[in-house]
Amino acid sequence: MLKPNPNYASLNESYLFYNIAQKVREYQINNPDKKLLHLGIGDVSLPLCKAVITELHNAVNEQASKDTFHGYMPECGAPFLREAISDYYKGRNIEIEPDEVFVSSGASDELGDIQDLFDKSSSALIIEPAYPAYVDANIMAGRKIIHFPSGENDGFAPYPDEKIKADIIYICSPNNPTGAVFTKEKLAAWVEYANKNGSVILFDAAYEAFIENEDIPHSIFEIDGAKECAIEICSLSKTAGFTGTRLGYTVIPKNLERNKMNLNSMWIRNRTTKTNGVSYIIQKGASAVFTPEGQKQIRENLNVYKKNAKILAEAFDSVGLWYCGGKNAPYLFVKCPENKTSWEFFDYLLNEHQIIGTPGIGFGQNVDAYFRFTSFGSEEETALAAERIKNM
């Protein structure tokens, strides 16, 4: 008799976004004349840049001709894109070879798939609050999870605790949901911890393009020793608006080994078994992101989101709300006023100011007193929301 994976029974029901949708729908039905301002979803609001669109069209046209048609792509990524990403790292004085870069359909997919590299007996340390999929993917795998809380006292970017031992370590910087960033000093401490304990760091760099402070690392590989203990997973979703187009990349250094097994070689074997690669058209579009013109154009969009974050930060400052993020990150993690829970603050913002954000409780049990706002909304809605916040 077939036996389903019993770990799925251990998953908590995902009520967060369902409840948000239900509350918003009910409010809109009862108040059809009210304009709702959406600052909760992590999706982007600006289109793909011209350089990407042009290359996507060119690739589609190539598929219409026998001479330029492309069928199956290399499972680990097209050489032209792996080389472009390698050069992108070299632009930051980080030596990553093309065959250490693996092209994927997005960071979310890869963060789940990458667990194939680790035995289910390996423990996973997740710094919370965190992207919920970190926890759920490890529950599905039947893995022991170490919930590692962070807070205001460490700026939601803690140092490791030597008394706690973990095999896999999740670090997201800039962080979703808090907008916190890890300094070089803090990342160096985690790298030292991982190498000392034989752990592997899964470094989620999905928001690295938002970093403006030169002292904040864009990549874990800016830290000495990281190539011996870290895997970096990145995405073009927020960097270049690929949320609906889907493309990301993973960097696994060739000298990352554990228990005499080479993780780069293992991942090649995994990808050549489990995927047929990302489509030629999407990879060609992605390659335009790493051209000088593409970088210039995506920066124009990123600057809109950065301006939105600044506008929201100024609004929170004006009413005396504590928050994390807003600089070097697209998220602002606000402490709820008047000891409200995050759902109470959600209801207040929706009913009194028609602003929609995301309750902190969705990102960890230790942050029910916090609330996430994103800067990915339109300029107009963000400015209007800021004015309403100032009048809270």
Image (spheres, grey):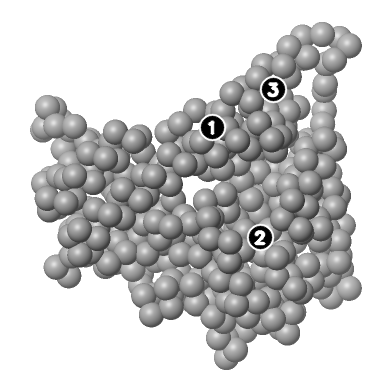
* Numbered label attached to residue 78: none
Residue picked out by circle 1: 244
Marks 2/3 in contact by CB < 8 Å: the verdict is no
In which quarter of the view is residue 252 placed?
bottom right
Question: Of tags 3 and 1, which is closer to the observer?
Answer: 3
119 up-or-down from 295: above or below? below
Q: In the displayed structure, does residue 310 sit left or right of residue 143?
A: left
> Does label 2 or label 3 sit earlier along the sequence?
3
Distance from disc 2 to disc 1, alpha carbons, whole Å, reads 24 Å
Residue picked out by circle 3: 55
Q: How many marks?
A: 3
Q: In the displayed structure, does residue 175 sit left or right of residue 289?
A: left
Residue extending furthest toward the bottom: 163
Q: Residue sitting at 89 percent across and 73 percent down?
A: 260
Q: Percent position (x, y) of residue 36? A: 22, 36
Which of 184 and 350 lies nearest the eye of the viewer?
A: 184
Circle 3 residues within 10 Å: few <14, some 14–19, many ≥20: many
270 up-or-down from 29: above or below? below
Which of 87 and 68 lies nearest the eye of the viewer?
A: 87
Q: Residue sitting at 67 percent across and 65 percent down?
A: 220
Query: What amino acid is found at the position of numbered circle 3 in the picture?
Result: Glu
> Does label 2 or label 1 sit earlier along the sequence?
2
In which quarter of the view is residue 255 placed?
bottom right
Q: Percent position (x, y) of residue 333? A: 35, 60
Residue picked out by circle 2: 219
Query: What amino acid is found at the position of numbered circle 2 in the picture?
Result: Ser
Q: In the displayed structure, does residue 187 sit left or right of residue 303?
A: right
Judge whether residue 132 can be spotted in this image. no
Distance from disc 2 to disc 3, alpha carbons, whole Å, reads 27 Å
